[in-house]
């Protein structure tokens, strides 16, 4: 084999690697840079049970500890129903306009009385009590959840 042939093959491999890298960047950008519209994230709930501060199956609450640049004020409460997706995208049930939050960042779900947080392969990760999670992780009442730069407190009962 001549040196010229080896250099030719290396150039072809380099060009394929470069195109692969550009395609991956375009894929990430197309997923992450989706325009959003602000919604409340509220769901219908039984009023009497919430007035008493009772736990409602399939419903939890997020208290905003640090809204970063998400448009959510500190102390605001967000109602979370089972299966709710949190993210920056227009299809998210609860929208956080923080630049570090993915379009579909995480999902909250109630599995027979045990609430779980599913990280949806977000770029900046999901954290429970400061620990990065991969896949699903069980939540407890009072846990701190960080999505992007937004810090939330997970509550089973509505805050007083």
Image: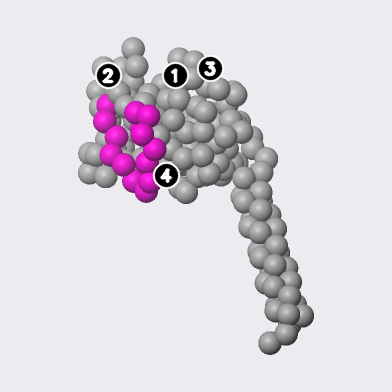
SS for dot 3? loop
Q: Nearer the viewer, residue 20 or 115?
A: 20
- Residue denoted by label 4: 119
Residue 85, magenta (yes or no) = no
Residue at x 39% of width, y 38% of height = 132
Mark carried by residue 53: 2
- Residue denoted by label 3: 73
* 141 sits to left or right of 81: left
Relative to 49, residue 147 above or below: below
Q: Position of residue 57 (x, y in %)?
A: 27, 35
Q: Which one is earlier in the sequence, the residue at label 4 or at label 2? A: 2
Q: Position of residue 34 (x, y in %)?
A: 66, 44
Q: Which one is earlier in the sequence, the residue at label 2 or at label 3? A: 2
Q: Which one is earlier in the sequence, the residue at label 4 or at label 1? A: 1
Q: Residues within 10 Å of mark 1 (few under 14, many from 20)?
A: some
Nearer the camera: disc 3 or disc 4: 4
Q: Residue 157, located in which quarter of the rendered image?
A: top left
Instruction: Using the rendered image of the protein, determine whether residue 95 is visible from the camera's viewpoint.
Output: no
């Amino acid at each position: 084999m001549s040196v010229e042939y080896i250099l030719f093959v290396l150039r072809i491999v380099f060009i394929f690697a470069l195109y692969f890298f550009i395609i991956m960047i375009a894929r990430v950008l197309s997923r992450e840079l989706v325009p959003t519209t602000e919604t409340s994230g509220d769901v219908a709930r039984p009023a009497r049970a919430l007035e008493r501060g009772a736990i409602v199956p399939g419903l939890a609450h997020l208290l905003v500890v640090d809204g970063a640049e998400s448009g959510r004020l500190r102390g605001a409460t967000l109602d979370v129903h089972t299966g709710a997706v949190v993210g920056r995208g227009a299809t998210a049930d609860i929208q956080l306009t923080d630049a570090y939050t993915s379009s579909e960042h995480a999902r909250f779900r109630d599995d027979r009385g045990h609430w779980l947080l599913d990280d949806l392969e977000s770029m900046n990760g999901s954290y429970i009590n400061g620990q990065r999670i991969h896949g699903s992780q069980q939540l407890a009442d009072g846990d701190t959840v960080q999505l992007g730069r937004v810090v939330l407190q997970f509550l089973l009962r509505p805050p007083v």
